[in-house]
Image: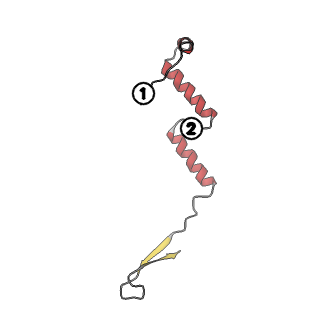
Amino acid sequence: MPGKRIEIDGETWPVLDLLARDRMMTFQELADEAFAGLLKKHNRPVLLKTALRQSVKQLGSAGALGRHRSKKITAVAPGDCGHGRIERQAV
């Protein structure tokens, strides 16, 4: 887990420390709970796996899946009228 430094003012730190002691939690556990609540408030997923699931659901509900038509690619011999080009045909 990457470590980050944050600065907490002198009035807030004792209150957070007391809260952590009262709840028998570490400061990291308090921070995890606080950030999870903030993300939930703004409708953001906490876990990457959840974010990917939401993304797939949004793509599926928007009708983006299944819109692509498959194309059949055929090669034309150099001696044919196609002059060695590859042509695409919609299927």
- Tell which circle, 2 or 1, labels the residue nearer the N-terminal end: 1
Q: Position of residue 53 (x, y in %)?
A: 55, 45
| Image-quadrant location for residue 16 | top right
Q: Position of residue 57 (x, y in %)?
A: 59, 49
| Image-quadrant location for residue 86 | bottom left
* Viewer-side label of 2, 1: 1
The residue that label 1 is drawn on is: 3
**For the point 54% across and 11% down, which residue is it?**
14
**For the point 45% across and 75% down, which residue is it?**
73
Q: Position of residue 49 (x, y in %)?
A: 51, 41
Q: On the rendered structure, is 79 left or right of 44?
A: left
**Disc 2 marks which amino acid?**
Pro
Q: Looking at the image, what colour scheme do you see?
A: secondary structure
**Disc 1 marks which amino acid?**
Gly
Instruction: Give the Cα distance between marks 2 and 1.
Output: 21 Å
Instruction: Please say if 75 is above or below 79.
Output: above
Q: Circle 1: is it few (<14), some (14-19), or many (20+) Cα within 10 Å?
A: few
- Give the structural element (helix, strand or loop) at label 2: loop
Q: On the rendered structure, is 66 left or right of 75?
A: right
| Image-quadrant location for residue 1 | top left
- Give the structural element (helix, strand or loop) at label 1: loop
Instruction: Please say if 30 is above or below 18.
Output: below
The residue that label 2 is drawn on is: 45
